[in-house]
Image (cartoon, rainbow, N blue to C red):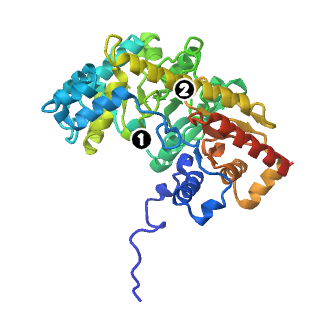
């Protein structure tokens, strides 16, 4: 028998990989996929399931089968023309019968800039698109943006991972909100950097407690950890909370005083439920509105994406980040690392262009675009409010209504018997709850422990994307009642 050992095993691969965890696509999602496959194939196992379909409430993936958010017509028309540009040339007369004139004009202009969507572009992304991103930022914030400081990316996640890899050395500390999106802890584990949690205040609508943030910095410095970066997710994921102007100014001041780079995850900036009461304000706008010595020195990288908002084009992989007050030497390194990946997906770059530069009011496509985007926004808002209302009526459940994003993070007062049973199974109590919920109802949620939570508390993250909200709530309520009775 050969004594040869495999080149790759858990003991020989990069040990940092072993430490990476990503709850959104973890054990629960894998089990849900198995149920979906069994139901699709109509196996014997599927006949024994107490549900006929799986409700994917675990991930913000609006166009996913089962959630079925309809793609924006304007987007798909332009993208289809760019995928088959002959429609704008020899088949133009046919195209005119199908496509509004403004979409053909827009697609022609993009084709003139890009050429074939199958070709590489500049590593930062198409310059014309970056210029329009800069215009979008300038109009949003009232301060100019430089297209050379903007990098188009394969979704915001790729940008976050890249900037964190460039910013953090082994052991460096990165302040992250708890609860947080698991991308951040996963990336920190991979980089062998140190997560420095600061807890958001659930009793105060998941607001940021500045004293808690200062305490996290102080404790890190006392332990000898270099605090290099601070992550803010606004609007919040998984909480749906929006930061106040005062809280944001305090964050920027802290970054100035402690020489910390600010990483602003702003991918849900379009998903604001009550903009008159709590509008979205970017950290770029806050920073540039402060006194000059702060405005011109605090290093900021802000991220945006086509995966969220009203577009929901997750699979197209498009996003961008803007660098503010980053030195020329570091910008060269960021560009070098972008060049290693050649370029972001061209289809995603086109999506970014359509996101930052939608049809104008006098365009033929505008009325339909407005109707579709308004419906998406209103449905998301109404589902979120309805779900929060029902959660708060359930025994032992409390849920802060979301101010934005597309999630809810209800808290479950777990019975002691359930906690003890979870220990016997080798699980966190909220993981056991979520697994039992999936087995009984087909609802796939994510346990709060995957996002981080105050010790002794238990949560679930669910999306507000499920079209059959009444059915979702009904299934959930029945399960929860049975669960609480079982472990009373």
Residue 354 falls in image quadrant? top left
User: Which element type, helix, strand or loop, lies under badge 2?
Assistant: loop
Does residue 239 lie above or below 291 as drawn?
Answer: below
Residue 6 falls in image quadrant? bottom left
Q: Residue furthest bottom?
A: 1
Q: Residue furthest left?
A: 90
Crowd band around label 2 with a 10 angstrom C-alpha radius: few (<14), some (14–19), many (20+): many
Q: Which residue is mark 2?
A: 235
Residue 475, horizontal then vertical, whole percent: 70, 43
Q: Residue at x 44, y 59 (%)?
A: 14
Q: Which residue is mark 1?
A: 161
Does residue 23 lie above or below 94 as drawn?
Answer: below
Residue 333 as seen in the image, left or right of residue 265: left
Q: Nearer the viewer, residue 284 or 358?
A: 358
Residue 365, horizontal then vertical, whole percent: 34, 19
Residue 438, horizontal then vertical, whole percent: 65, 51
**How far apart in space, not on screen, are marks 1 and 2 (Cα)?**
19 Å
Residue 94 visible here: yes
Residue 300 as seen in the image, left or right of residue 277: left
Does residue 395 lie above or below 266 as drawn?
Answer: below
Q: Residue at x 28, y 35 (%)?
A: 80
User: Which element type, helix, strand or loop, lies under badge 1?
Assistant: helix
């Amino acid at each position: 028998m050969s004594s040869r050992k495999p080149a790759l095993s858990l003991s020989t691969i990069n040990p940092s990989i072993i430490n990476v965890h990503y709850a959104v696509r973890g054990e629960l999602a894998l089990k849900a996929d198995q149920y979906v496959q069994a139901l699709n194939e109509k196996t014997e196992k599927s006949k024994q399931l107490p549900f006929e379909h799986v409700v994917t409430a675990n991930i913000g993936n609006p166009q996913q089968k089962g959630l079925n958010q309809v793609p924006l017509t304007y987007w798909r028309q332009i993208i289809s023309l760019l995928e088959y540009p002959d429609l704008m040339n020899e088949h133009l007369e046919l195209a005119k019968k199908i496509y509004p004139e403004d979409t053909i004009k827009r697609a022609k202009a993009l084709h003139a800039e890009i050429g074939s969507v199958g070709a590489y572009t500049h590593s930062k992304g198409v310059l014309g698109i970056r210029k329009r991103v800069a215009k979008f930022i300038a109009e949003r914030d009232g301060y100019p943006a430089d297209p050379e400081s903007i990098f188009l990316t394969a979704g915001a996640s790729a940008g976050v991972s890249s900037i964190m890899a460039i910013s953090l050395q082994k052991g460096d500390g990165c302040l992250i909100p708890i609860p947080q999106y698991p991308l951040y802890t996963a990336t920190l584990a991979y980089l062998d950097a140190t997560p420095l949690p600061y807890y958001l205040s659930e009793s105060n609508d998941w607001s940021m407690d500045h004293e808690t943030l200062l305490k996290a910095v102080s404790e890190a410095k006392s332990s000898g950890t270099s605090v290099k970066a601070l992550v803010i997710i606004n609007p919040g994921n998984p909480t749906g909370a929006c930061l106040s102007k005062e809280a944001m100014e305090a964050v920027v001041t802290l970054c100035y005083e402690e020489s910390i780079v600010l990483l602003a995850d702003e991918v849900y900036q379009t998903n604001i439920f009550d903009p008159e009461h709590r509008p979205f304000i970017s950290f770029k706008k806050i920073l540039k509105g402060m006194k000059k010595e702060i405005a011109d020195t605090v290093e900021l990288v802000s991220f945006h994406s086509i995966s969220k908002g009203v577009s929901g084009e997750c699979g197209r992989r498009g996003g961008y980040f803007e660098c503010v007050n980053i030195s020329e030497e570091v910008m060269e390194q960021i560009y070098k690392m972008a060049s290693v990946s050649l370029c972001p997906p061209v289809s995603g770059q086109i999506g970014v262009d359509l996101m930052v530069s939608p049809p104008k009011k006098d365009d033929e496509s505008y009325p339909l675009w407005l109707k579709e985007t308004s419906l998406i926004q209103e449905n998301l808002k109404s589902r979120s409010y309805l779900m929060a209302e029902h959660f708060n009526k359930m025994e032992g459940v409390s849920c802060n209504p979301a101010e934005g994003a597309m999630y809810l993070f209800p808290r479950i007062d777990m019975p002691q018997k359930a906690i003890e049973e979870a220990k016997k199974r080798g699980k966190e109590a909220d993981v056991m709850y979520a697994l039992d919920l999936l087995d009984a109802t087909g609802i796939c949620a994510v346990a709060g422990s995957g996002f981080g939570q105050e010790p002794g508390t238990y949560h679930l993250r669910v999306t507000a994307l499920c079209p059959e909200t009444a059915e979702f709530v009904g299934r959930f309520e029945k399960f929860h009642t049975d669960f609480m009775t079982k472990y009373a």
